[in-house]
Amino acid sequence: MVSGGKFLQAVHFKGVIMTFFFQSLLSGLLTGGVYALAGIGMSVVFGVMNISNFAHGDLMMLGMYMAYFAFTLLHIDPYLSLLLIIPTAFLFGFLIEKVFIHRIIHHPHQNQILLTIGLGLIMSNTALLAFTSDPKILTTSYSSSAVTIFGGISLSVPLLLSFVITCLITGILFLFLSKTTTGLALWATSQNREAAQLMGINVSKMSAIAFGLGTALAATAGALIAPTYYIHPMAGHTFLLKAFTICVLGGLGSVVGAGVGGVIIGVVESMSSTYLSSDWKDVVVFIIFLGVLLFRPQGLFGKKGEQ
Amino acid sequence: MIQHLLYINHVSKHFGGNVAVSDISFSVDEKQIFGLIGPNGAGKTTLFNCISGFYPVTSGDIIFDNKTINKLRPDEVCHLGMARTWQRVKPLGSLTVLENVMIGAFSITHVTREAEKIAIEQLESVGLIDYAKKNAGSLSIGLKKKLELARVLATHPKMLLLDEICGGLNLTETETILGIIREVRDKGATIVFIEHDMKAVTAICDWIVVLNSGEKLAEGTPEEITGNPEVIAAYLGGGHNA
Amino acid sequence: MKQIAIIAVIAGIAAVLPLVIGESPYFTGVLISVLMMAALASAWNILGGYAGQYSFGHAAYFGAGAYTTMILISKFNLNPILSMVAGIVVACIIALVTGSIVFRLRGHYFGLASIAVAEIVRLSALNFDFTGGAQGILLTDVSLWGVDLNSKTPFYYGMLLVLVVTLGIALSLRTSKTGYYLQAIREDQDAAASLGINLAFYKNKALLISAALTSVLGSLYAVYIRFIDTSAVLDLRLSIEIILTAIIGGVGTVWGPVLGAVLLVPLAEMLRSNVIGDALVKQGMVSETSGLGVFLKENLAHAHVLVYGIITVLCILYLPKGILGLLGRKK
Ligand SMILES: Nc1ncnc2c1ncn2[C@@H]1O[C@H](COP(=O)(O)OP(=O)(O)OP(=O)(O)O)[C@@H](O)[C@H]1O
Ligand SMILES: [Mg+2]
């Protein structure tokens, strides 16, 4: 028989373990939401243009700096500054497509990758020259505040806000893609570029819109994590690889897949930090990436036979 | 007794819900010129892709030279002595015509000089030798089809699968290619031949199988097939000017 | 053969070069970098240029060589040559794992997976103890058969030797069955398979050759510098520099990667050591104490990666076949 005291102790212990678990799950979920946004941005570009955008992480980094400077120079709350960042980033992406990417849209895939790598290097190293390599920290009045739910699980307020905004933006994006003429044209282009062109869709405009959207989403994701991460010129690299993992996990080019993939990666990361060590969380993510390639190359949601 | 070189045994191939090839059976004898015809979308190319190892079959067996080959990779099928051409030609664009054919020849030799010798022979036999040093990507469509043929011939195959090798060619070009095909057969190879041009098919084939919407519609000698009202209906119905 | 003669002549010139320029450690250092980058880009080119399989993670093989060698020498006092061989083995194991996962797939995956593998290797080296973690590995003293390895000259000849071997392999592949097969795979995988080419086998073969050569260079570099950490030998930036060098010279050609290295490495060196900024100041065009002068002095050293980025973009847009491609040389 277990004595009463020991029993209570055991229950308490179990409770701590469970709190630990849910704490980790929930914060993973919240971060994953923001990752999902970045993944969706990359997936839109991939779906419509069939290009792996290696500048995606650096576009996120630009979003982080935009939020930072909007806050420090203009005193605009980082979440409010999205209203500024989203249109600016869209325009920036649209122009990048018009000036650079559209000229290589029919080139071999590796050239497209290299061009976006080059653009990314220009962005990150210009940021390095302009802002130096010192990491910046965006501290708002609520940066380190947290709410406690279910007695014991504490969630950071900025993460929570980010998640809510992510859900909002994803919802709007979804409506845009499924209800508007432009959204449907984007979808048609992603299904079959030639057929879309024959149907009278201006596919080169769709590419520019897609890249603008991708950029806006990347910058948004960057701005949303700005209050919780160090902001520095090379911050994009980690996120680039995460965004790729998310896309492959969801099936390259699948928007819904990228959304779910982002959440999965967020949770996996958070769980591996909790139960393994935060040093190894990225390794776990990349091993999952290779595992997906090995066992389910079409992604969790992609159609079979599309390799 | 004649040997069956290729058995197609109740082969089906589905793409999701789309049945491209449905329960097809036939056999090809050694040294035959065997015609595979049917309207657009009948499933001819899909069947070739199954035979040559590019698509896994959904069900059924493919037996070549007494070996079941439907689990093999394309390169393994090629090494058993079966070579195919592509309806949408696939020249190795930045290599020369000679190098394209040498790559075929490397399946039977490891020595570069030897491969070059075989390639030159094949280029001569299809009449491409003057273009040997040209980039394969720069050839006209007619010459690209000839290159397809030269390239598979360089693998010295027992059986050739030719997918619309005369498609888009003019009359004299077609005549040349038919001549080459006959020659190859006389040297001992077996040929399976997909073609839309009925005149070419009836002129050259010993036996014909007709596919329609993935199913086998008829088979027989050229005379039987051209007289078959169902075949005529399928072709007219398919809107094809045979 | 003409090409072999060219290699011999260039190697001959390179061999006597140190005697001509004398014992300038600085220039010897730059020349070693040129030779190393030329060899790295040539090794990458066997896989990326011939077979069309762009690896974005070649730093993994460089790092595998460097780390294995350094660990074996510093912890077990093993002979440098044997440590180098061990490095090749490790690099080949990593290559085989990568290849067996990815070469069954087409399209975008090899590039992406090669980065993932390289990142796994980098993070592992960063997080394990036996690799020295973030501190890296420092080698205080090393010798081989009584040769003084504190001088740069042995490494100059070492790099030269590896470069010559790499070029020799690249050249002999060009005219061999394997080389033709790799090019066929680059041009059209379906056509290649239908002509009897075992795609996975030949891609793996190219990857192994490329990885082994890259790892030798990593070992050599590590013993030369006598200090390594992940940012020096396993960084994504290194992988990208290797590709850029090959691309700018002319991908898929024998001499393109060498040309790329001859152009890019001195350029990067000039930016890094701030030759341009110093020159501008010396010429009196910019005052040393003015805002611009201070900016140039402090920041231009960082600018070499920015310049790489600009060159990449321009090169892909205007010169996708590289300089040799522009000159219209076929092989
Ligand atoms: N990879 C594929 N995925 C999905 N469906 C396919 C695929 N390949 C072929 N099909 C379908 O299979 C059917 C048969 O096509 P196939 O190309 O075999 O016809 P075919 O007889 O060669 O026609 P044609 O004379 O035009 O060449 C078509 O409906 C086609 O859409
Ligand atoms: Mg067909």
Image (spheres, coloured by chain):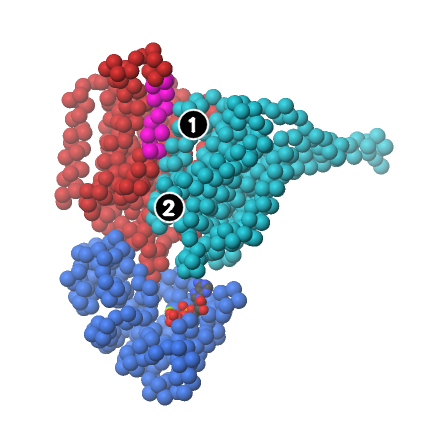
Please state the extent of the stretch shown in magenta in the rendering: C294-310
Taking C135 as reference, is C39 left or right?
A: left
State which image quarter holds ligand 1.
bottom left
Above or below — where is A72 with respect to B2? above
By secondary structure, the bulk of the magenta-drawn segment is best described as helix
Q: Secondary structure at mark 2?
A: helix
Pointer 1: what residue? Answer: A127
Taking B57 as reference, is B182 left or right?
A: left
Q: Residue at x 53, y 29 (%)?
A: A67
Drawing shade for chain C: red
Pointer 2: what residue? Answer: A102
Q: What is the total number of numbered labels drawn onto the structure image?
A: 2
Could you tell me which chain the residue with mark 2 belongs to? A
- Looking at the image, do the residues carrying marks 2 and 1 touch, with CB atoms under 8 Å apart? no
Q: Is mark 2 within 8 Å of ligand 1?
A: no
Q: Which picture quadrant has residue A167? A: top right
Drawing shade for chain B: blue
Above or below — where is A1 with respect to C227? below
